[in-house]
Amino acid sequence: MPIVFNEVSHAYSGNPEQLALDHVQFHIQDGQFVGIIGPTGSGKSTLLQHFNAILRPTDGKVQVLDFLILPGEKIHEVKRLRQRVGLVFQFPEQQLFADTVEHDLCYGPMNFGATEAEAKLLAIAALEQIGLSPDLLSRSPFQLSGGQMRKVAIASVLAMNPDVLVLDEPTATLDPRSREEFMTLLHTLCRTQNKTVIVVTHRLDEVLPFTDHLLVMHEGKLVFEGSNMALYEHVDKLPTWRMAIPKPFRILQACEQMTNNPLANHVWQDGTRATFTPSWVAEQIHLLFQTSQRGDSGGVPCSNDSS
């Protein structure tokens, strides 16, 4: 089932006059890779905590899978909701607490009713999903590298086999190469396990190659919802939303201006996703200049361009 936020507002009890979320409305389909982006203070983290009812709306309603979250109403089976919606906070390695990786990974499944043997099988499967060896089970999590600790922390959520995985700034403090590898890993989980993956980040450039759907938050409001290509068509609004224009957008903007040839004329309409990866951008640059030189600004799918 999809995730639907319907006119959701939230005000913290200490400041009821100021809305941290202001009538937010969007729709996420099953199995999508979703980026929620925006600057610090835009409401991203408040929004994230509504996905598994850590926070509840002051107004409006949240539908997550088959759970309905309403203001002031008790949620039945909230424990099951939090099993099906795995939430990973920023710096998740700080949530590790046990003496071994195995004990950390087995804690969640056993808390939700798995036997010790079942929990260990889930722990092994989670490690393999995240790209780590089961040999780490007997190790102390605090003797691992920083990157391994982060992966183990996320594996501890995956061990509960959630339908939805929500991550808050999961690549914080990682170097650029590690960030790309980590996002690729999350995208693989989304595609191979058919999990809905929601990444909350202020780095638009790192989610562009992976997202099916983008949400942009600004001052507690949802100011954009759509594909990454649709966001490119609103690129001039990004500074207004206190966000940097990512490099692929800047390069393609410059090429459009040089050729007087809008990129939107050439991006195919068959549902193929614009990825804004270096190779995809290079193909679009080639197409923009090629069609400009022959005076043809009509749609030519780059996937069929053999020259």
Image (tube, rainbow, N blue to C red):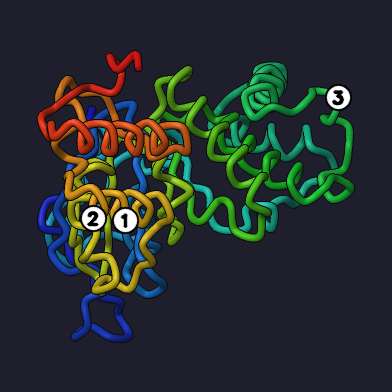
Q: Quadrant of residue 50?
A: bottom left
Q: Are marks 1 and 2 in contact (CB under 8 Å)?
A: yes
Report x, y in % for residue 176.
Answer: 63, 51
Q: Is residue 76 above or below residue 42?
A: above
Crowdedness of circle 3 by 10 Å Cα count: few (<14), some, many (20+)? Answer: few
Q: What amino acid type is highlighted by mark number 1?
A: Ala
In the image, taking residue 172 as reference, residue 69 lies left or right, namely left
Kindly report which numbered mark, 2 or 3, lies closer to the viewer in this rendering: 2
**Residue annotated with mark 1:** 254
Q: Is residue 15 above or below residue 152?
A: below
Q: Secondary structure at mark 1?
A: helix
Q: What amino acid type is highlighted by mark number 3?
A: Asp
**Residue annotated with mark 3:** 135
**Residue annotated with mark 2:** 257
Q: Nearer the viewer, residue 154 or 33?
A: 33
In primary-sequence order, the first of circles 1 and 3 is 3
Q: CA distance from mark 2 to mark 3?
A: 54 Å
Q: Give me the residue at 51% from left, 26% from top.
A: 189
